[in-house]
Amino acid sequence: MAQRRGDRQKAAALGAVDAKELIATIPGLAAALSPAQVEHIQNLLDAAVLNPVLKKEADDLYRQSVTHQIGSQVNRDPEKVEKAQRVYDKMILVSEQDYHIRLDINKLLTADALTPRTDNPDEVNYLAKVRNTLAGRGIWLRVTQPYVRDVQDPSSHVKDPRKWQLWFSLGYDGDEIPTKDGKIDRDELLSTTMLGAGYYTAVHTGYVQTKLKAQMARLSVELDDGIEEHERLIKRYRDAFPGVAEISDFLGGAELPSRSIWTRPRQLYTKALYANVGGNVLEAQVYLVVAAIIVQANAESLAVYYDRSASGAGTAVKILKVAKTAGEIAEAALILTGIGAVVRGGRAVKGGANVAAELAERKARDEAAEKLATEYAKKNGIPVSELSVPKYVPQPKGSVAGYRKGGHSSGAGTGWHEW
């Protein structure tokens, strides 16, 4: 789309918009355009006012070239036809493609436009796909004319050659990308229908978030069930005849843990919730894993109490279910980032028949959880003690559950007198 020397002056005299003034309507846009692109835009603006004038002049000359006409046969003056053609040739040739100008995305995107804001692996992967999409489809500057009311006929609308708009699109003819300063940031990219919907699908409802939210919901139920069962035991103890509960527990070597053992897992679970609200799934994962293992430890300590008290193992079904499910949650949460894969190999025999394999599996899981928690704590300046994982100690054959070392990051074993 070349423009002859002198056309610019003629177009300006006819009221053509200056390209630099139009470009300035989007702050910062000039820095993203090459001199050739600025000239290209100017040609479009000049053509809008110059071409109609030239076409009218050429059409008039062409009509005047008619010397005589018989029926459908028209004879023309060759000199006048040639003169009309020279005027036609002065028109600036413009096609629809010329109103779409592909830009350099590196000059348009802000430095952090494709930088993840969370630690969600799904977000990292999706933003990598966005970069590939932008490289393939491109970001285009669109040069368009809005419709305005026709002065001659107020009931209709026309395009005014002196009115123009500039905007960005995703791809040659895709969604508009809004911008306030000629730079496109992350929020503006994701405001497009295609990229925004893709982000929601890939990240907010992606694999990691979906699995994490499901495990958090499960742990919430088991945490409530564990506390409820513990409170039932406390009530049963208090409602017993004076001395009966103490003697029964003393004879059986039982010790009812303090209700405070649920404080820490509840706090960790809450931190997992808050982390996930911000989209930080790795942070939520760590807190969820540790919380689940502590819930399992607490449930097992109550199961041991059942076993050793006069209530007997047969009444521990509910609390054992809490322990089992909490353990499954811890493993499932580990698998979110591939860590849990090292844990699954031990289940060679269904139904828990292979005790040695189950113990090895559990040991591997706890070690993986401890490694995850310790590394995360050190990397993020969190006290290691906040994410400490209680150690599992198998009980003698015949016990309904395992136990945890006293000391006790889970809080178990503090005694019934400290409720």
Image (tube, rainbow, N blue to C red):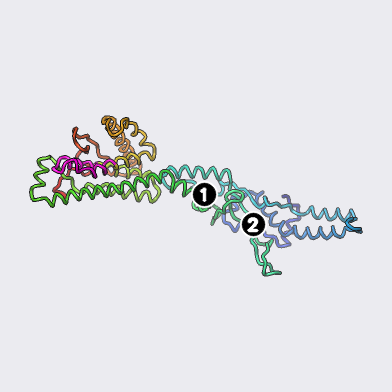
Give the amino acid type for the residue marked by disc 2 in the picture: Thr
For residue 76, say whether it is visible: no
- Which residue is painted at 85% across and 55% down in the image? 83
Residue at screen point 71% across, 69% down: 152
- Where does the image place residue 79, in percent across and percent down from the top left? 89, 54
Instruction: Judge left or right: residue 397 versus residue 273.
Output: left
Q: Secondary structure at mark 1?
A: helix
Q: Residue at x 41, y 43 (%)?
A: 208
Q: CA distance from mark 1 to mark 2?
A: 23 Å
Mark 1 or 2, nearer chain start = 2
Considering depth in this image, is 112 or 340 the residue closer to the camera?
A: 340
Q: Look at the magenta stretch and give its main secondary structure.
A: helix
Amino acid at circle 1:
Leu
Across and down, in percent, residue 269 comes to: 31, 48
Q: Which one is nearer the viewer's eye here, 395 or 387?
A: 395
Q: In the rendered structure, find residue 144 and report the number of the disc placed on it.
A: 2
Quadrant of the rendered structure where residue 14 is?
Answer: bottom right
Instruction: Give percent across and percent down for residue 121.
Output: 43, 42
Q: For label 1, count other residues whose C-alpha is less than 10 Å away and answer few (under 14), some (14-19) or many (20+).
A: many
- From the image, tell me which residue sits under label 1: 195
Q: Which residues are magenta?
A: 297-324
